[in-house]
C-alpha cells in the first residue's frame, strides 16, 4: 500500500510517499517539496497574503497530482504553526480546499509534539526506556517525554528557527553580539515554563533530536552525512554544539551556507536554531542527543497504518477522487 503525507510547515511544504504494510517498516518511495517559507508571506497584521495563499494552493494541487501519478492510495494533509498562527489561517485552509479538493488539517503544537514522539518511539523501540524528544521547526519548538508509545508530557513554544531569526537576527548579514544576547535571553525566558513541564515527565534515558534543524546541527558538529543512510548512528554533544554556535555567531549567512549539512535557504536561520537547541540542552542538563530520521510525517503515517490494522474508521482523502474524470 502506498500512502502519502503532505506537511505544510513554516519553511517547506513537503509531500512524502511511503510504501507501508501491516507489521513492516514504512519505506520511502518518493518525495516532492517546495521551500515556500510561508511565514514570509504575512502582512503586518499577521495575515497570509493572497500571493502566499495562491503559491500554497498551487503547490497543494501539484502535490495532489504527484500523489495520483505515483499511485498513492490516500493523502494525509496537515498544517502546522505557519497556518495555525496566521490571523486568516482558516480562510487560507478554506481557499486551498475549494481549489484543490484537499483538506489541510490544522494540528496544534502539542499534537505535533506527541505525533513526532510517536515516530521516535517506533524508530528507537521500547528498549531505550524513557525518551525525551526535541523538534525545532520554522515557527515552533516542540518537546515531549515519556515511556510509552505516546508521551506523558508534550509541549510547544514559539521558538522556531525561522521565527527567531526574523525577530532577532534578520537585520544584518552577520549577527551582532547585542542581537545574539537579546535572542539568548528571550529563548531562556520563554523556555523556562516548558522546561519545568517536561522535567515533570522524568529524567530521560535517551534524548533525541528530530527535524532538519537538528540534522543540520548534528552534521555541523561532525555527524555522518545523510548519504550514508538512515541506519548510521548520529549523535550531537552539547560541548560541540556550544563551540559551533559561537563560531556561527561570527559568520555571515553566506559563510554558514558553506557548512556541512546547511542548505542555502536555511543558512540564515541555522544560528537561531543552534541557540534554541543549545539553551534547551543546557537548561535540561543534556550532554548528548541522538538524531532520529523519523519525525512528524512518519508519525502520521504510522498512526494511519495502525488504525488501518485495527479496522478503525479513517477520515482521509483519496487523491484519486480529487481529479476530475
Image (cartoon, rainbow, N blue to C red):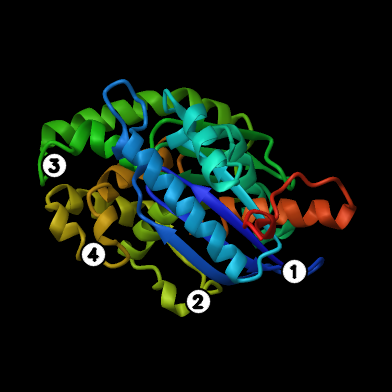
* Circles 4, 3 touching at the beta carbon (< 8 Å): no
* Circles 1, 3 touching at the beta carbon (< 8 Å): no
- How crowded pointer 4 is (Cα within 10 Å; few <14, some 14-19, many 20+) is rated as some
Q: Secondary structure at mark 3?
A: loop
Side of 42 where 57 appears, left or right = right
Image point (36%, 59%), residue name: 216
Q: Residue 160: where, in percent of width, then height?
A: 38, 39
Image point (63%, 67%), residue name: 18
Residue for badge 4: 259
How far apart are the alpha carbons under marks 3 and 2? 34 Å
Q: Nearer the viewer, mark 4 or mark 1?
A: 1
Residue at the front extreme, as displayed:
325
- How crowded pointer 2 is (Cα within 10 Å; few <14, some 14-19, many 20+) is rated as few
Viewer-proximal residue, 111 or 79? Answer: 79
- How crowded pointer 3 is (Cα within 10 Å; few <14, some 14-19, many 20+) is rated as many
Residue for badge 2: 229
Q: Residue 266: where, in percent of width, then height?
A: 29, 54
**For marks 1 and 2 on the same chain, the one whose residue lies earlier in the sequence:** 1
Residue for badge 1: 1
**For marks 4 and 3 on the same chain, the one whose residue lies earlier in the sequence:** 3
Residue for badge 3: 175
What numbered label is drawn on residue 92?
none
Amino acid at each position: 500500500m502506498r500512502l502519502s503525507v503532505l506537511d505544510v510547515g513554516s519553511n517547506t511544504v513537503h509531500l512524502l510517499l511511503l510504501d507501508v504494510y501491516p507489521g513492516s517498516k514504512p519505506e520511502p518511495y518518493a518525495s516532492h517539496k517546495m521551500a515556500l517559507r510561508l511565514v514570509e508571506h504575512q502582512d503586518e497584521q499577521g495575515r497570509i497574503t493572497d500571493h502566499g495563499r495562491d503559491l500554497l494552493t498551487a503547490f497543494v494541487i501539484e502535490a495532489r497530482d504527484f500523489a495520483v501519478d505515483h499511485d498513492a492510495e490516500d493523502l494525509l494533509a496537515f498544517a502546522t504553526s505557519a497556518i495555525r498562527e496566521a490571523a486568516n489561517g482558516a480562510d487560507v485552509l478554506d481557499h486551498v480546499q475549494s481549489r484543490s479538493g484537499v483538506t489541510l488539517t490544522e494540528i496544534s503544537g502539542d499534537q505535533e509534539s506527541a505525533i513526532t514522539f510517536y515516530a521516535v518511539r517506533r524508530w528507537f523501540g521500547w528498549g531505550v526506556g524513557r525518551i525525551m524528544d526535541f523538534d525545532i521547526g520554522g515557527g515552533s519548538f516542540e518537546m515531549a517525554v515519556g515511556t510509552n508509545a505516546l508521551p506523558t508530557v508534550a509541549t510547544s513554544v514559539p521558538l522556531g528557527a525561522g521565527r527567531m531569526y526574523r525577530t532577532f537576527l534578520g537585520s544584518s548579514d552577520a549577527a551582532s553580539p547585542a542581537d545574539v544576547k537579546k535572542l539568548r535571553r528571550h529563548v531562556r525566558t520563554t523556555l523556562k515554563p516548558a522546561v519545568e513541564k517536561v522535567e515533570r515527565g522524568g529524567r530521560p534515558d535517551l534524548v533525541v533530536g528530530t527535524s532538519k534543524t537538528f540534522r543540520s546541527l548534528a552534521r555541523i558538529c561532525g555527524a555522518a552525512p545523510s548519504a550514508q543512510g538512515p541506519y548510521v548512528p548520529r549523535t550531537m554533544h552539547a560541548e560541540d554544539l556550544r563551540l559551533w554556535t559561537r563560531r556561527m555567531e561570527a559568520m555571515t549567512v553566506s559563510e554558514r551556507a558553506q557548512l556541512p549539512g546547511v542548505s542555502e535557504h536555511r543558512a540564515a536561520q541555522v544560528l537561531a536554531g543552534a541557540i534554541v537547541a543549545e539553551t534547551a540542552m543546557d537548561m535540561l542538563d543534556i550532554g548528548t542527543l541522538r538524531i532520529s530520521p523519523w519525525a512528524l510525517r512518519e508519525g502520521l503515517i504510522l498512526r494511519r497504518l495502525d488504525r488501518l490494522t485495527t479496522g478503525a474508521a479513517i477520515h482521509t482523502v483519496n487523491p484519486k477522487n480529487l481529479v476530475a474524470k
